[in-house]
Image (spheres, grey):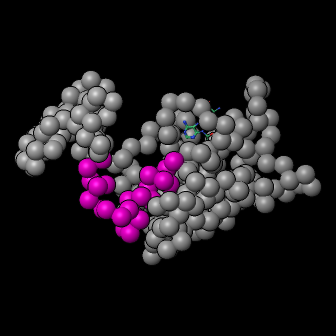
Amino acid sequence: MSFRATVVTLYPEMFPGALGLSLAGRGLEAGAWSLETVQIRDFATDRHRTVDDTPAGGGAGMVLRPDILASAIDHAAPEGDTRPRLLMSPRGKPLTQARVRELSAGPGAVIVCGRFEGVDQRVIDTRGLEEVSIGDYILSGGEPAALVLLDAVVRLLPGVMGNDASADEESFENGLLEHPHFTRPQMFEGLSIPEVLTSGNHGKVAQWRREQALRLTEARRPDLLAAEHGKKDGADR
Ligand code: SAH
């Protein structure tokens, strides 16, 4: 069984969107993964197909109703569906490459996209939704976040990336940012490719790349190095 994604949304037209093109799109066509959408509005119960209501306690905006969203989720993931249920949410745990890897090794995901001010807390609690954030900023809806998450997951699925080895060398995979890249022409606007990269000495190249990666990570993301140290200390104990 290949990776199965079900997106619960008010805007199913946004899918597959960008994921219908390039590597993800070819993978989708080839059956390396599958995608279905569930329109939340189809589970509305009134004539106007209302899905939201004003926040209890007052304040601006609207909140997705728990009864309607729960019906949509139950339809997307009937009893016995073992896929993780994610809610895209700025309050969630920030998405990491490690979580992306875990998800890509599993059966798929049910991904709920919020809109307006968000969703009623009771549906998060009763449906066991894992809140996932893609960063410390606010989107107008969960759909672009779901596309980001799926893009990251899908490229790791068997048969989606042409060169599987390159996935292991990316930024974050070894706790470091990746080294800089260069390609021909040898001279560009007076700048040449670092000599070591054209030396043919694979050992030296590997060493240079590792040094560059370390330097870059120290300068830009010292938090990543600290986290790596934390892991190692933990393993020693
Ligand atoms: N009032 C909320 C924000 C609502 S934004 C708050 O302050 O926390 C509307 C919807 O967009 C959210 O329900 C969520 O599904 C999605 N969203 C917004 N920012 C996001 C982020 N950084 N990561 C993941 N989803 C996000």
Q: Residue at x 61, y 59 (%)?
A: 16
Q: Is residue 94 visible?
A: yes
Q: Nearer the viewer, residue 231 or 4?
A: 4
Q: Residue at x 55, y 30 (%)?
A: 137
Ligand 1 image position (quadrant): top right
Q: Residue at x 29, y 55 (%)?
A: 166
Q: Is residue 137 above or below residue 161?
A: above
Q: Where's residue 44, x and y in %? A: 81, 56
Q: Where's residue 147, x and y in %? A: 55, 51
| Figure disc tally | 0
Q: Is residue 2 left or right of residue 87?
A: left
Quadrant of the image occupied by residue 178: top left
Q: Where's residue 15, x and y in %? A: 63, 57
Q: Is residue 58 above or below residue 232?
A: above
Q: Is residue 150 left or right of residue 68?
A: left
Q: Where's residue 156, x and y in %? A: 38, 59
Q: Is residue 213 above or below residue 147?
A: above
Q: Which residues are magenta?
A: 148-170
The C terminus - image quarter: top left
Q: Is residue 157 left or right of residue 182?
A: right
Q: Is residue 227 visible?
A: no
Q: Nearer the viewer, residue 44 or 111?
A: 111
Q: Is residue 117 left or right of residue 191?
A: right
The N terminus - image quarter: bottom left
Magenta span includes 162: yes
Magenta span includes 159: yes
